[in-house]
Image (spheres, rainbow, N blue to C red):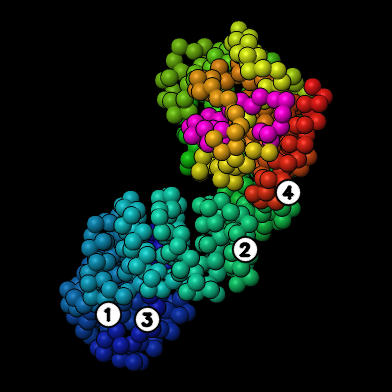
Amino acid sequence: MLAQVLKRAARVWADRGKRGREISPAAWEEIDARLASGDAENAEAVWVSLLRQNPESPVALHGLGRLQGMRGELATAGRNLAKAVRLKPDFTEAWIDLGNVQLTSDKPEEAESAYRRALAVDETSVLAWCNLGLCQQKRSQLTEASESFRRALDLNPRFGLALRHWVGIQTKLDWPDGAAELLERWADMVPDHAEAQAALGFMWLKHRFRPDLAITHFNRAVALGMNHAELHGNRGIALQDLGRIDEALASYDKALHLEPENRAVRFHRSLAKLLVHDFEQGWPDYELRLLNEECPRRALPFPRWDGTELSGKTILVYAEQGLGDEIMFASCLPDIIVRSGHCVIECHKKLAPMFRRSFPTATVHDGGQHDEPSGLSGLPPIDCCIPVGSLPLHFRRRLEDFPQHTGYLKADEARMSYWRRSLAGLGPGLKIGITWRGGTRQTRQSYRSMPLDTLVPLLEVSGAHFISLQYDECRDEIAKLGSVHGLTLHHFPAAIADYDETAALLGALDLVIGVCTAVVHLGGALGRPVWVMAPVGPEWRYGVTGGTMPWYPTCRVFRQAAPFAWEELILRVRNELIAYLDEN
């Protein structure tokens, strides 16, 4: 990897003035010709011959050391390059190549010193700034590296290596203030630069969650001749977020034609296939999620279950992803419980009371996804294990495999009775739960959420009482709804703070209406009537067409007609609610 970086960072010998006058034009022509033809061995022979004639030639020492460094002879290269800069302290290129050798030798401090010496000689050296950034990045100095790449790009916005690393750092730093504007400025300076357009598309897609704008820049990059797997993969994600699944699949296929084993592209293609209910093709590559660097590595001392006979054996099904995912994939737990001798279920502690109630023949362990294997001590002896998100690979291969259940999770009956009495005190009319915000900023919250006041046309419908199921801080929003619009949205924070209590509240409600969030999954898993308002390009769980979800027979899906077009969707839901109230 570092050898490749070193090769990319190497400069072509184009500026004869910087080479020094100690090498004859004929020698330069011979070296140029051999390097251009890839004949590094004979080019080295020329440098060696020149050094025999003049052992103190910094230019020949640099040329020889640079070739040796590219070949991996780091110690020898370092000695020659160090001698070159001793003889010629203002030799910028030699300092840069010495830094490259030190960086490749895993000596980042010495490398940084060499790059800074190069910049002390020539602070306009784009390569020195870029390589300094690479060095700082290796030392996990992300803020400093970002600044070094910025200096390189201010000097040359077309410097693709610096741009790619700068964008990667902004993603890790969650795009600090001013970063997006910097990228836009550089792109404006070079409107015909494909990499800048691809970077802009990435920013709009991953930072600002605007796939409609991202696709414009990705298309420009393609039109400008860029043909990278990463570009086609990101373009596929944008198309998928826009609900254009056929085009997304075509873009993923282009990416995989270039890089057949690109795991990120294969994973996102699997999500597109799951969106259109192609479960047979989707589930196998969905397993690639487990290789994501953000996925907890579970060093469990049990073999992975591969679908073989489980009679008389104990299997551990362990937790992964978020609460909504654990709830949804739990629909497969009855299948594995029946098939195994015994099932041990690891789940989030918020879900443990409900899972114990719902799966009484299983052993439920309230563990965390980052727990050490020692946390499983005291459980029955385990023969094999599987992450809960991998159960559908065995039990949901076709649409027909999804059961028409009436609820596989069970709320506490006593607490449901309590909430029925409490809600009855609100007066006559249906009791309807409401959510309007889902996920986090990193999980596209802005794309699948709306301001509370967008729901005003729905909340104005008479004959119903609306109850907030919003899990985060929302009291100010609810107060504003009352003061500005004169509408009441009841809120019971204690019921939201405890998931088992939330389940009891849901069990007492007549209907839940919400955006794509965990409460929707909980309501569907309890067998309660749920209406979900989905963006035009929802997560794969919700499908991309139709008004139903295979996971939850009691769930209806209302879909946007265009990105961020919530108002029109709310009016459709309002009309359906009026009809629903008339029927009930």
Between discs 2 and 1, the one toward the N terminus: 1
Between discs 3 and 1, the one toward the N terminus: 3
> Which amino acid type corresponds to the residue marked 4 in the rendered image?
Ala
Above or below: residue 86 compared with residue 310: below
> Which amino acid type corresponds to the residue marked 1 in the rendered image?
Ala
Nearer to me, 314 or 61: 314
Nearer to me, 383 or 425: 425
Q: Which corner quadrant of the image does residue 534 belong to?
A: top right
On the question of residue 24 being in view, the answer is yes
Q: In this picture, which residue range is highlighted in magenta?
A: 458-482
**Residue 13 x, y percent position in the rendering:** 37, 81
> Which amino acid type corresponds to the residue marked 3 in the rendered image?
Trp
State how far apart marks 1 and 4 are (Cα): 67 Å
**Label 4, on which residue?**
561
**Within-10-Å neighbours for mark 2: few <14, some 14–19, many 20+:** some
> Which amino acid type corresponds to the residue marked 2 in the rendered image?
Thr
Between discs 4 and 3, the one toward the N terminus: 3
**Within-10-Å neighbours for mark 1: few <14, some 14–19, many 20+:** many
Nearer to me, 513 or 285: 513
State how far apart marks 2 and 1 are (Cα): 49 Å
Mark 2 residue element: helix
Which of the two discs, 2 and 4, sits closer to the camera? 4
Nearer to me, 43 or 81: 81
On the question of residue 281 being in view, the answer is no
**Label 1, on which residue?**
60
465 drawn magenta: yes
Q: Can you tell which mark lies on residue 216?
A: 2
**Label 3, on which residue?**
13
Quadrant where the image shows the N terminus: bottom left
State how far apart marks 4 and 3 are (Cα): 57 Å
